[in-house]
Amino acid sequence: MHPHLAQRNTKSLLDDRPTYKKLELNQKRNDEQDHSAMMDEAAAKFVYEDCKDEYWNPEEFSLLYGTPLWNESSTAQKVILNQLFWVGYYSQIISAEIATIYLNQVSAAGLYAHEDFRIVCDSLDLETKQERAHINAFKTIGEDVEWRLFGERLFTYPMRSLFEQTMIFADSNAGKDFWRKLQIKAFTLLSSSNAFLASQYLLVRGLRTLNGKQIQHKLSLYYTSHPDKENAPIPSKISYYHFMDESFHFNTSKLIGHEIPRSLDEPTSFEKFVMNKGIAGCQKDHFNFSATLKGIFWYEPSLFPVLYKLFRSVHFGMNDAEARKMLEGCFCQENEAINQAYELHRTAYESYKVYVDPIQYLDDQNRNMKIMGGNSIQKYLSLNTKALRNFRST
Ligand SMILES: [Fe+2]
Ligand SMILES: [Fe+2]
């Protein structure tokens, strides 16, 4: 902004040269290395037959890995479970990215009302465009796999807006959904004209993707350590390309969420209140852990119908009693999968605390992630046991 003319803001992003430089570099490098065209190309070339007998992720990233089901599965069944991890994991990522597309735009609108924020908005525009390519690749492959294996959907869903649900298997009901919808609408209305809230959406985005970054790094290793990259399964390539794009997105989240508030006025108590609500909501979303798909914070009982369908399918061939007994063995008695899922949840919890540590306006409950930290294996087992008793398969 012109230093000698009257402006509405007393501070400018240009005064914080180091942050501005970092934003510029992040944007430039993401633009140069953009993997979204490669993702489009890979998705277009996907033929299930070509890679149907192989793993697409490192073995431990298989659906139900470490449960009795996994331990009893044949080699062919394990391949399906490995591929279904990919489908399920990225179905959740699609949902998160649908929300990201919308909220990036809202946030850019809120920040553009300030002088000198073009660099931030341009970064968010590029990321939004990349998310559409990411969604296309995940959706194309996920739907094709489910169609070929089951002739119906398990984890995928038709295109929808962010108001439907962010966690695709959540502990929810009509009442909770109503409030969630209202809260998002209120937040987007406020942040589209409020630079502080707009910047802090990126704090939430960074927090929500912190755990994803760790998992997606591990998923990308299948491709990077593949002896014949050219012929590596296409879904594993897509995991790698996606991880490449997302590393820039994560930097953007961190820079905007952590550094930008310095270039803005001090938040009001109302703004602090709204953000504390938002972070608490994020903690609630990440309260659960799942042995079905470790690294995603799904609510296990909401997966029972899908897993029942999977166990009854031709690929696993169980009858009603066998399928129920298997659900019980997987989710109501301690096993390796539950321990691993819980461990990952604890790691996420610890890293969230470190991430929000510099954020002064957060209350004690959020600084110490007390909601998320309140879950335990005991709670998980008793909840599942109760839910399984009430589970009706039809
Ligand atoms: Fe993405
Ligand atoms: Fe992203």
Image (tube, rainbow, N blue to C red):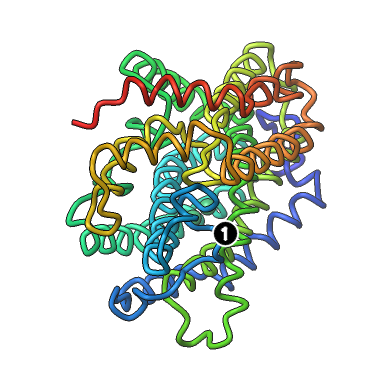
Residue positioned 65% across, 28% down in the render: 8
Q: Provide residue 176's location: percent of width, then percent of height.
A: 39, 16
Q: Is residue 50 left or right of residue 277?
A: left
Residue positioned 64% across, 28% down in the render: 196
Q: Provide residue 215's location: percent of width, then percent of height.
A: 60, 54
Tell me, yes or no, if residue 133 can be seen here.
no
Q: Provide residue 205's location: percent of width, then percent of height.
A: 58, 40
Q: Could you say which quadrant of the image residue 42 lies in?
A: bottom left
From what the image shows, is residue 74 above or below residue 45?
above
Q: Could you say which quadrant of the image residue 274 lies in?
A: top right
Q: How many marks?
A: 1
Q: Amino acid at mark 1?
A: Glu
Residue positioned 74% across, 40% down in the render: 351
Tell me, yes or no, if residue 290 can be seen here.
yes
Judging from the image, what secondary structure is the residue with disc 1 in?
A: loop
Residue positioned 25% across, 26% down in the render: 392
Q: Is residue 76 left or right of residue 349?
A: left
Q: Is residue 328 left or right of residue 217?
A: left
Q: Is mark 1 within 8 Å of ligand 1?
A: no
Front residue of 69 and 147: 69
Q: Is residue 146 left or right of residue 92?
A: left
From what the image shows, is residue 230 above or below residue 364?
below
Crowding around mark 1 (Cα neighbors within 10 Å: few <14, some 14 to 19, many 20+) is: some
Front residue of 113 and 67: 67
Quarter of the image that includes the N terminus: top right
From what the image shows, is residue 74 above or below residue 199?
below
Quarter of the image that includes the C terminus: top left
From what the image shows, is residue 27 above or below residue 121?
below
Q: Please name the residue that numbered disc 1 is placed on.
A: 60
